[in-house]
Image: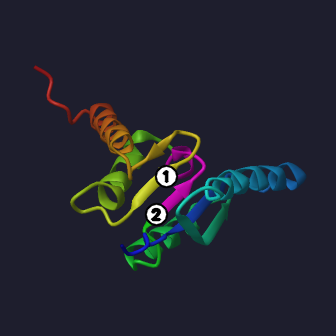
Amino acid sequence: MAPERQAKAVGYVLLETAGGAQGAEHIQRHNGTVIAHFRDSRILLTHMIIDIGGRQGRGRAFDLLVMERASVLVVPSLAQLARSCAELAPLLAHYFSPPAGVADLIAVADGIDTRTAQGRIAIDVLRTVARFESGSVYHA
C-alpha cells in the first residue's frame, strides 16, 4: 500500500490597513490561525501570502492553484477572500466547485473544508445566498 501523498497548500491573509503595532498584531493572529491549522494535518503549507491594504496577493494565491503549485487554499475566514456573498460566489464557483474547480478551500474560523461533504454543502449554500441577494433566483 502506497503512502498517502501530502497535499500542498497556499495560505492567504488579508489585513485591510497596516495600523502600526495593532496591524502587526492582526497579521500575527491571522497568520497564526492559518499555520496552526497545519500542525496535525496532512497538508504542507508551501506558500504564505499576506496582503496589507488591498487584495493584490489574492490573485497570486489563485495563480498558484491554477498552476498546480498548490491544491488547497487556506484562509482564516471567508471574509479574507471577499467583502460580500456576491463577490465571493464567482470565486467559489470558479476555483472551488466541481467540476470546474481547481482546488480545495479551507476557511479555518468558518469551519469550512471543501474536502469534506459538509464543506461542499456550505459552499453550495453560500452560492445560493449570493444568487438570492443578486436577484437571480426565480420567485414563484
Residue farthest to the front, as pictured: 1
- Above or below — where is 102 with respect to 81? below
How far across and down, in percent of the image, does residue 62 sit?
45, 68
On residue 55, which mark appears?
Answer: none
Of label 1 and label 2, which has the lower sequence position? 2
Count residues near mark 1 (Cα–Cα under 10 Å), then give few for <14, some for 14-19, many for 20+.
many
Measuring 46% from the left and 63% from the top, which residue is drawn there? 72
Hey, what amino acid is under mark 1? Ile
Q: CA distance from mark 1 to mark 2?
A: 7 Å
Residue farthest to the left, as pictured: 140
Label 2's element?
Answer: strand
Measuring 63% from the left and 68% from the top, which residue is drawn there? 48
Q: Are marks 1 and 2 in contact (CB under 8 Å)?
A: yes
Judging depth in this view, the residue of 117 and 135 nearest the camera is 117
Judging depth in this view, the residue of 3 and 131 nearest the camera is 3
23 on left or right of 33: right
How far across and down, in percent of the image, does residue 73 sit?
49, 61
Hey, what amino acid is under mark 2? Val
Residue farthest to the top, as pictured: 140
Count residues near mark 2 (Cα–Cα under 10 Å), then give few for <14, some for 14-19, many for 20+.
many
The C terminus sits in image quarter: top left
On residue 106, which mark appears?
Answer: 1
Q: Please report the bounds of the magenta region as a residue range.
A: 73-82
Measuring 39% from the left and 43% from the top, which residue is drawn there? 119
On residue 72, which mark appears?
Answer: 2
